[in-house]
Amino acid sequence: MSKITLRQATPDDVAAIAALFRGVAEATRPYRPELHTPEEDHEFFGEAVATKDVWIAEEDGTLAGFISFSTRWVNHLFIDLGCQGRGIGSALLDLAKAENDALQLWVFQENIKARRFYERRGFRLVKETDGAENEEKQPDALMEWTRGGSKKHCQTQ
């Protein structure tokens, strides 16, 4: 088995991050409308690398996944389809947990695989929405993790 290394992303990683994001999103979320061009993805992740905590997982020097997080928020967590199920997402998520006593994230309601992933790692559903407030206009769910695992009551909007 190859060795996975975690490190903070640099500007040199932006093109690979943007490509991984687009490829995984297109393959796993067919319900998500395409709202941005690949160039816009590159610009967005370039700004994220410059202003937020973005960490990558590499396998033999090739990008296997990435996480973007800020104080109390997981902004993105994407793992290459061929690398899923090997603990890479958990390792990246643990970086964000180590820096925060609580984390929140949004996930599309239809993304059952991601919701189960987060639930197995201690996240609890806080509320579900009809998607009117998100860019994609797709029903989503707010999930939260707290150190010690305090539970919140669920809400549906």
Image: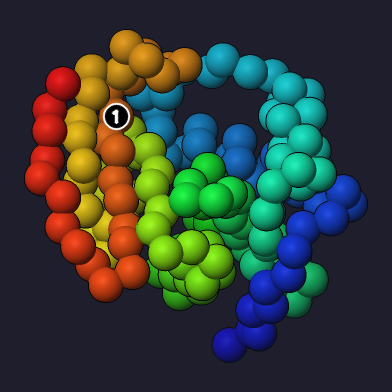
Residue located 21% across and 53% down the image: 124
Residue where numbered disc 1 is placed = 140
Circle 1 Cα neighbour tier, 10 Å, few/some/many (<14 / 14–19 / ≥20)? many
Of residues 116 and 146, the one drawn nearer to the viewer in this rendering:
146
Of residues 62 and 55, the one drawn nearer to the viewer in this rendering:
55
- Quarter of the image where one finds residue 151: bottom left
Q: What residue type is labelled 1?
A: Asp
Residue located 51% across and 72% down the image: 98
- Judge left or right: residue 6 versus residue 93: right
Residue located 78% across and 24% down the image: 39
* Residue 91 place in picture, x, y as percent: 51, 73
Q: Is residue 116 visible?
A: no
Compared to residue 90, the image places residue 29 above or below, namely above
Name the quadrant of the C terminus.
top left
Residue located 58% across and 49% down the image: 70
* Residue 32 place in picture, x, y as percent: 42, 23
Of residues 119 and 87, the one drawn nearer to the viewer in this rendering:
119
* Residue 126 place in picture, x, y as percent: 21, 42
